Amino acid sequence: MSANHSLQKLLDELGRLPGIGPKSAQRIAYYLLEADAEEARRLAEAILEVKQEVHFCSRCFNYATADECSICQDPMRDTTRICVVGEPRDVQAIERTGSYHGLYHVLGGVISPMDKIGPEQLHIRELLARLGHEDIHEVIIATNPNIEGETTASYLARTIKPLGVEVSRLASGLPVGGDLEYADELTLGRAIEDRRAI
């Protein structure tokens, strides 16, 4: 196998990664070529380890290394609230705020008819089962404020409200430090609808 073939294979594999275009793939590939063998080995081992060790939590579908994730196992969490998100990375984003101390439920995506993803392809059935046997008082829907996220939020609200559980949605609107003149109509409209007294 020639050096060119090996390099092209690496470029092809790097190019498959989300957010990595041809130029980025080339930069990473050349960096790895110039790195010492130990650094490349550590990277390869880290990738293999995460694929072998990390799976989905059996309760909330977040990433976990045990049967349940560390959040589900934490006795200090508020077990009366579930924050519903689309993907495990959304859990990390909310956790970084330090403002939420309840449990989570990861849907594994959002409703998207264009991509042929309906409620049955998501972990909605499991969420409803949790609401049936856990003492949950509030479900906070934290899907992205786009068409798919709004569709998913509406579907969840219609499905959960008849169960007698309070349903709320993350507020959305203007970012701190943003200028009104640069806000799009949807964001500005949502900010007006979600206004609060001061």
Image (tube, rainbow, N blue to C red):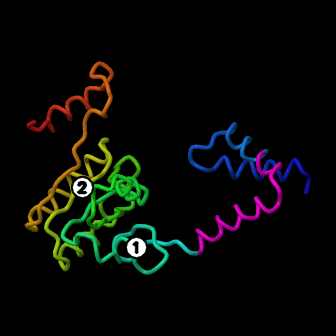
Residue named by callout 2: 141
Within 10 Å of the Cα at label 1, are there few (<14), some (14-19), or many (20+) other Cα atoms? Answer: some
Identify residue type, mark 1. Ser
Magenta-highlighted residues = 31-52
Picture mark count:
2
Q: Nearer the viewer, residue 35 or 133?
A: 35
129 over 34 or under it: above or below: below
Which residue is tagged 1?
A: 70
Locate the C terminus and report the quarter of the image it occupies: top left
The chief SS type of the magenta part is helix
Q: CA distance from mark 2 to mark 1?
A: 21 Å
From the top left corner, tell me how far across and down residue 46 is, in percent: 65, 66
- Residue 179 locus on image (x, y percent): 30, 23
Residue 32, percent from left and from top? 77, 51
Q: Residue at x 30, y 48 (%)?
A: 149
Question: Picture quarter containing residue 30?
Answer: top right
Residue under the point 38% across and 46% down = 114
Residue at image coords 76%, 64%: 41
In the displayed structure, does residue 117 sit left or right of residue 84?
right
Q: Amino acid at mark 2?
A: Ile
Mark 2 Cα shell of 10 Å, populated few (<14), some (14-19), many (≥20): many
Of all residues, the one furthest to the right in this rendering is: 2
